[in-house]
Image (cartoon, helix red, strand yellow):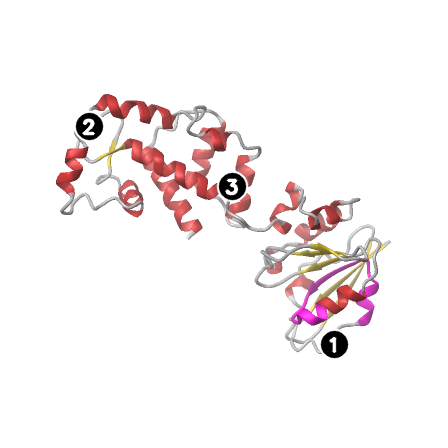
């Protein structure tokens, strides 16, 4: 039977959140819980002997000392934080001890989350694989660093879509939209750097709006087609929705972003500039 030790320095008068949120028992594991006051002047020496240690350590030196004393084999060390440890590197020591950093705040994890994490990590090679850069999709939100790769790309595609649809004229043609009308559209394109349609540049915008409708029809048709070349960089990704959700972090993805992802996935015409504008605004806020 594998042993799990949970150490939480931040306890106050009660057990810390790391200890409280960990399952009271797990089949196939013996669980030991240890807490200390905030000063963390001492760390129990026996922690080094457990197969798995999940630790909320105040002192880097104490954590490094624990890792150094731990022997190889199947030993696994997971460091947590109330702020999350995204950006910290996972490693495998010279003695074969796997050291992982939990990316989200441990306060946000539930007993069910922890059970899923532990059951997955003890499978042969999974923990070491994570330390070497291969994170299974089911564990990505816990151990994959929070990098925004797809969200910025989606925001750029939304900008191009809006540029193709925006008409500076009060009476848009060909499926366009006057960007002084819809509040979402106006807000989006002004954040993209377009001038205020009610300002001194209005006459310039009206002149731009005299472009022949036939010249605007082709780019609009291009960006509305989710199966075409324009959306291909995203449509071709494996598990696009899952990747967006992971980059969105723990919050629910906005309804407008879900709408756009559904249109792309189901190859339905993307024919609502107002909604695409809101998608852009949601992405801009998330990435700011």
Separation of marks 2 and 1 at Cα, in angstroms = 74 Å
Q: Nearer the viewer, mark 3 or mark 2?
A: 2
Does residue 199 appear to the left or right of 114 in the view shown? Answer: left
x and y percentages locating residue 9 in the rendered image: 68, 71
Binning the other alpha carbons within 10 Å of mark 3 as few (below 14), some (14 to 19) or many (20 upward) gives some
Asked which secondary structure carries label 1, the reply is loop
Count the numbered circles shown: 3
* Residue interval drawn in magenta: 45-63
For the residue pair 176 and 70, the one nearer the viewer reads as 70
Query: Which of the numbered marks, if any, corresponds to residue 244?
Result: 3
Asked which secondary structure carries label 2, the reply is loop
Magenta span contains residue 196: no
261 relative to 112, above or below: above
x and y percentages locating residue 276 in the rendered image: 36, 36
Task: Name which residue lies at 44% across and 50% down.
Answer: 287
For the residue pair 254 and 75, the one nearer the viewer reads as 75
**Label 2 sits on residue:** 211
The answer to whether residue 122 is visible is yes
**Label 1 sits on residue:** 42
Q: Nearer the viewer, mark 2 or mark 1?
A: 2
Does residue 179 appear to the left or right of 158 in the view shown? Answer: left
x and y percentages locating residue 105 in the rendered image: 59, 59
Task: Name which residue lies at 42% across and 45% down.
Answer: 283
Q: Residue furthest top?
A: 214
Query: Which of the numbered marks, if any, corresponds to residue 200?
Result: none
109 relative to 195, above or below: below
Q: Earlier in the sequence, mark 2 or mark 1?
A: 1
Binning the other alpha carbons within 10 Å of mark 2 as few (below 14), some (14 to 19) or many (20 upward) gives few
Q: Residue furthest front?
A: 94
x and y percentages locating residue 187 in the rendered image: 29, 46
For the residue pair 270 and 135, the one nearer the viewer reads as 135
Task: Name which residue lies at 36% across and 41% down.
Answer: 278
């Amino acid at each position: 039977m594998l042993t799990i030790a949970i150490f939480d320095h931040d306890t106050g008068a009660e057990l810390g959140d790391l200890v409280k949120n960990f399952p009271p028992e797990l089949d196939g594991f013996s669980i030991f819980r240890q807490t200390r006051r905030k000063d963390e002047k001492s760390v129990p020496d026996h922690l080094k002997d457990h197969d798995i240690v999940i630790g909320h350590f105040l002192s880097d030196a104490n954590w490094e000392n624990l890792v150094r004393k731990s022997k190889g084999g199947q030993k696994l060390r997971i460091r947590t934080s109330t702020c999350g440890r995204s950006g910290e590197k996972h490693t495998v020591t010279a003695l074969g001890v796997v050291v992982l950093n939990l990316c989200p705040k441990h306060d946000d994890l539930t007993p069910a989350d922890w059970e899923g994490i532990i059951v997955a990590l003890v499978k042969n090679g999974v923990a070491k694989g994570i330390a070497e850069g291969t994170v299974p999709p089911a564990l990505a939100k816990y151990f994959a660093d929070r990098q925004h790769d797809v969200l910025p790309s989606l925001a750029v595609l939304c900008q191009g879509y809006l540029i193709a649809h925006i008409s500076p004229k009060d009476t848009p043609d060909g499926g366009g939209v006057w960007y002084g009308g819809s509040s979402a559209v106006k807000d989006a394109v002004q954040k993209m750097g377009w001038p205020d349609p009610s300002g001194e540049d209005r006459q310039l915008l009206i002149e731009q709006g005299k472009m022949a409708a036939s010249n605007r029809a082709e780019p609009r048709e291009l960006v509305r087609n989710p199966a075409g070349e324009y959306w291909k960089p995203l449509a071709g990704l494996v598990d696009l929705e899952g990747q967006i959700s992971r980059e969105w972090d723990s919050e629910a993805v906005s309804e407008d972003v879900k709408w756009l992802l559904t249109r792309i996935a189901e190859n339905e015409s993307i024919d609502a500039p107002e909604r695409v504008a809101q998608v852009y605004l949601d992405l801009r806020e998330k990435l700011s």
